[in-house]
Amino acid sequence: MDSKPATSSRRPLIICLGSRGFTQTGIRIAEAMQEVGWSPLLVALPVFKALVETHRVPYANIIHVNDCSLDFADSLVPSQAHNNAWLYSFYAKYAEGMLAKICRLARDHRADVLLINQTIFFSEYLRQTLRLPVVQCYTYPVRWTSSTQSRSGNISVDFREANAQLDGDFVAARAVPTDLHLLNFPSTFSKTHFPGIDGVHTGVLVGTHTSADEPLSQELDAFMRAGTPPVCVNFGSVPVYATPWVESLLSVLETLVRHGEIRLLAIGKTVPAELSKWNQTMRVQSAPHRQIFPRCACVIHHSSTQTAMATIVAGVPSILVPFIPYIDQPRIAAWMERAGAGIYLRDGQRTRESFLAALRRANGAERVAMCAAASKLRLHVSSYSGAAHTVAAIDAFMRIRASPEAQIAGVSKQVSNSMDPFIRPVLLAIGARANVQPLICMAARAHECVCWKPLLLCGPHHIALARAAGVAAESVFPDSVDVQEAFKLISKAEPEASAALLSEMFKTHGTETLRRTLLFTCQHRANVVLASSTCCTFMRWLRLQLFLPVVQIYHQPAKWQIQEDLAAGSQVNSP
């Protein structure tokens, strides 16, 4: 499946609520949509209007007032209770006007699909009111608990206390299988976001430099060229500099700068003004990570998803100091530390001595090894374009939703909202290794495609081969059956003897093979079966029992006499 959509223009409404990072994710998706001829409209807080329009993406204000001072990041602190209380107050103040505004924008824009992020707490209202397909975008896996647990436990909180139209239970409102769930984080970081809910891993929305990137100022470019690669401190828009441990960090940085051991680039709107007075130091409110990070010695950051992935793509060491302990930041820091791409300073470790030791390691003896580890992670983060795959996944979701049979027979049919948004092929590969390997390759290729969930059914001796290729596989024979050896004998025998051996094998093991095939196919919720030519002895049974389209795969011309003998001699067709 090609990752580039081949459909007429769609009109997505991208709803971005939260910090700058969420808006940047929406911008990257919108840019990829524009490249294929779609007409997106990005809805965000007014503080991000200039950022969105700089990238030539159509923008609309998400709230009913033009308050440019309103920024989620300004109110964040490490305390979950404080942040939840702030969210309650935000929704209590703006929810009614915000919901009315979004509904009006969706109708005026003639939107045909909604994209929402993790901080949208009115997803069920949008489904019921607008009756549009919903795509949920996750930049990191959510932590969650059941709604029966206390509000302080996690995100399963009742926002209806702030407004009656808001979601009563985050998990119930989000764990909707008929939505498309896009996972914009590496599968090596986490396989899923909600237990039991399928998601499509699209890749991280971090890429190479584009012309739409925020341009470097002449002053910043001159600083980057003026000497050795600087140490970069980047805490984004969050108020990290108000935390107690920052004093230790700044003390170490000032000492190293004064002694000429490092140059320093400090990025963020909350960077203290006093840093501008330091030698060999530059302070800026914002800078494009994709252009800056590859030119730095190392990056000190709070391990937010966007910043962490940008350092990985840049291939530079990280010193990881999470700011918010209850969401993605500590998990990303631990993941990067395990991979050797960063040094994670936990609470209680953020002393002057620890910061100094971390800087000496990342900017000295261990720098080469950490750069290599970051480059290795980069293969998982940027092996394909996350934005392009996001658009392809949405396109596939829309086509399958509107016309599920069109993928196979070109039949157009309106379906209900319960239609599974995934293509779930079962590949039935029975035979020697030469027969199984091509289907493993097909399954591996399908696994890379968005909205595809392949499952290989084969003999027990080929399970390890399939799983080594990253393919989900199950055995349809008992473990005691050496299918590989049996098919070696069959392939070497004369045609009549070969047919007899094959017939005898299925007479002995056919009932169990059919039972397992039916079980695994139903559990997988398959909607198409791909069968190797060696499955001819029960092809008719597959059609009658499963009522699924069957694609027959031939690796060589069939010998018709053998086929006729099998049809006559085998009892498997009539179990």
Image (tube, rainbow, N blue to C red):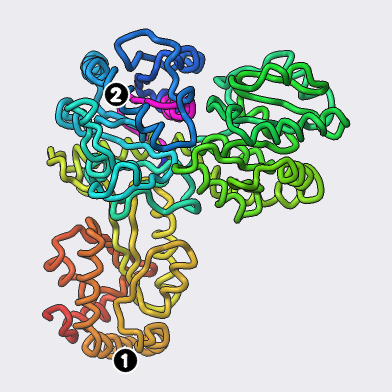
167 left or right, relative to 212? left
Q: Say which residue appears at 22% left-offset and 18% top-offset.
A: 96
Nearer the observer, 387 or 20: 20
The image quadrant of residue 486 is: bottom left
In this picture, residue 478 sits left or right of residue 131:
right
From where the camera sits, is residue 362 visible? no
SS category of the residue bearing label 2: helix
The mark found on residue 91 in the picture is: 2
Q: Residues within 10 Å of mark 2 (few under 14, many from 20)?
A: many
Query: Percent x, y for residue 195?
Result: 32, 54
Using the numbered discs, state the Cα–Cα distance from disc 1 to disc 2 in whole angstroms: 75 Å
Residue at image point 75% right, 44% down: 353
The segment highlighted magenta reads 4-30
Q: Which residue is mark 1?
A: 497
Q: Earlier in the sequence, mark 1 or mark 2?
A: 2
Give residue 200's position: percent from left, percent from top: 37, 46
Which of 180/156 is in front?
156
